[in-house]
Image (spheres, helix red, strand yellow):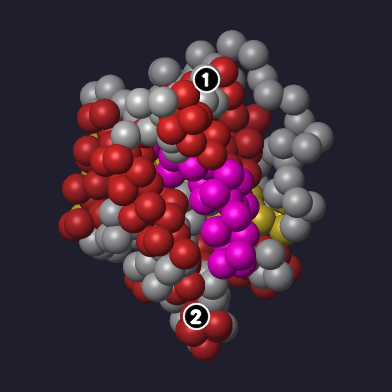
C-alpha cells in the first residue's frame, strides 16, 4: 500500500467525525457522544484509545459494523438498545426491550439513599418495579452491608435483573421476586423503599421521543390517565412495609411534585418532601434527607 493510500484509510478519528456529521444532520441528540460510544463498540476501542491513538486504522468489518450501528441510531434507536447495555451511577447494566433503559434522572434516588444510610450500616431495602435492577444494584454496590429485594410483574425483566446482579457479584445480597409492588411482604419489613414507577399520562405516550416511545416497554411508562395511578397504589403499600424511622424515595415526573407529595401525606407518611435533580427539576418524593443540604454520612 502506498503512503497516500495508507493516509486515506479510515481511522478512528475520521470514522468518528463522519458519524458525528451524519447524526447531527439526522437531528440526533448528543451526536458526538453517541458516535463515540458506538465507535468504541464497533472498533473494540476505549475512549482513551480514540484520544491517544486517533489515527489507528479501522478494518473493513469494523467499518461495516459501525455503519450499521449509525444507521440504527439514525432510525432513533437508543444507543443503549444498540449496545444492549447502559451505565447507571457507577455500574454497567444489561438492558433488553423488556426493561426501561436507566436514566440519569433516577440517580437522584441514589443521592437520597446514600445521604440516609452511612457506608457501614446494615439495612434492608426493596426496589418496587425493579426492571433492570438499576436502583437496587447501584445502592448495594455502594453499601456493602446492605441487602435487598427487587420486585416486578414482568418475568422477563426479572431475568435481566438477575443477570445484572450476577455480573456485578451482587447476587448474594440481591434477590428478585415476581409480584405486584409489595404484595406478599410483611408489615414493617424494610428500612429503605425505592421505586421508579410508570408516571407518563396515557395520552402523552404517543408524543414521546421515538427513543422512548418505540423502545421502552409501555408497562414501564404508562401511569394511567393522569400519570398518578402508580403512586395511589404505592403510597399505602410503602407505608405498610416501611419500618418505623425508615426512608422511602420514589421518582416522579418533573411536574408531579405537589400531587405525589399530597398522595403520600394522605396515606399517612410524615415528613414528605420533594427533592430536585441536577437540572433543578422536581424528581423524587421522599421522607429522607435532601441530598442538596445533607452531606453524605461517613461510616
- Give the mark toward the camera: 2 or 1: 1
Is 39 magenta? The answer is yes
As displayed, is residue 288 above or below residue 101?
Answer: above
- Residue 47 image point, x, y percent: 52, 27
Can I make out residue 266 in this image? Answer: no
Most common SS among magenta residues = helix
Q: Residue at x 73, y 40 (%)?
A: 290
Q: Which residues are magenta?
A: 15-41
Q: Residue at x 28, y 60 (%)?
A: 98
- Residue 177 image point, x, y percent: 22, 49
The residue that disc 2 covers is 205
| Rendered image quadrant of residue 184 | bottom left
First reached walking from the N terminus: tag 2 or tag 1: 1
Is 33 magenta? The answer is yes
Q: Is residue 254 left or right of residue 231?
A: right
Gap between marks 2 and 1, in whole Å?
A: 43 Å
Can I make out residue 210 in this image? Answer: yes
Q: Residue furthest top?
A: 299
| Rendered image quadrant of residue 40 | top left
- Residue 200 image point, x, y percent: 53, 74
Amino acid at each position: 500500500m502506498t503512503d497516500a493510500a495508507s493516509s486515506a484509510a479510515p481511522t478512528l478519528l475520521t470514522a468518528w467525525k463522519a458519524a458525528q456529521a451524519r447524526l447531527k444532520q439526522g437531528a440526533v441528540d448528543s451526536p458526538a457522544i453517541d458516535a463515540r460510544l458506538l465507535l468504541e463498540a464497533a472498533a473494540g476501542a476505549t475512549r482513551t484509545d480514540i484520544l491517544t491513538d486517533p489515527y489507528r486504522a479501522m478494518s473493513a468489518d469494523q467499518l461495516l459494523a459501525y455503519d450499521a450501528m449509525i444507521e440504527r441510531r439514525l432510525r432513533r434507536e437508543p444507543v443503549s438498545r444498540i449496545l444492549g447495555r447502559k451505565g447507571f451511577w457507577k455500574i454497567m447494566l444489561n438492558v433488553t426491550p423488556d426493561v426501561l433503559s436507566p436514566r440519569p434522572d433516577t440517580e437522584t434516588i441514589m443521592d437520597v439513599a446514600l445521604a440516609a444510610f452511612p457506608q457501614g450500616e446494615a439495612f434492608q431495602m426493596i426496589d418496587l418495579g425493579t426492571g433492570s435492577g438499576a436502583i437496587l444494584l447501584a445502592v448495594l454496590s455502594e453499601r456493602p452491608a446492605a441487602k435487598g429485594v427487587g420486585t416486578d410483574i414482568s418475568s422477563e425483566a426479572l431475568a435481566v435483573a438477575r443477570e445484572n446482579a450476577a455480573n456485578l457479584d451482587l447476587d448474594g445480597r440481591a434477590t428478585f421476586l415476581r409480584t405486584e409492588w409489595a404484595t406478599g411482604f410483611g408489615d414493617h419489613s424494610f428500612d429503605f423503599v425505592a421505586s421508579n414507577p410508570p408516571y407518563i399520562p396515557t395520552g402523552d405516550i404517543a408524543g414521546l421521543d421515538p427513543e422512548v416511545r418505540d423502545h421502552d416497554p409501555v408497562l414501564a411508562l404508562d401511569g394511567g390517565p393522569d400519570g398518578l395511578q402508580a403512586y395511589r397504589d404505592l403510597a399505602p403499600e410503602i407505608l405498610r412495609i416501611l419500618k418505623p424511622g425508615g426512608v422511602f424515595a420514589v421518582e416522579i415526573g418533573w411536574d408531579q411534585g405537589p400531587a405525589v407529595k399530597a398522595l403520600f401525606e394522605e396515606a399517612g407518611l410524615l415528613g414528605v418532601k420533594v427533592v430536585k435533580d441536577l437540572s433543578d427539576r422536581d424528581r423524587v418524593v421522599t421522607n429522607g434527607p435532601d441530598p442538596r443540604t445533607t452531606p453524605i454520612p461517613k461510616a
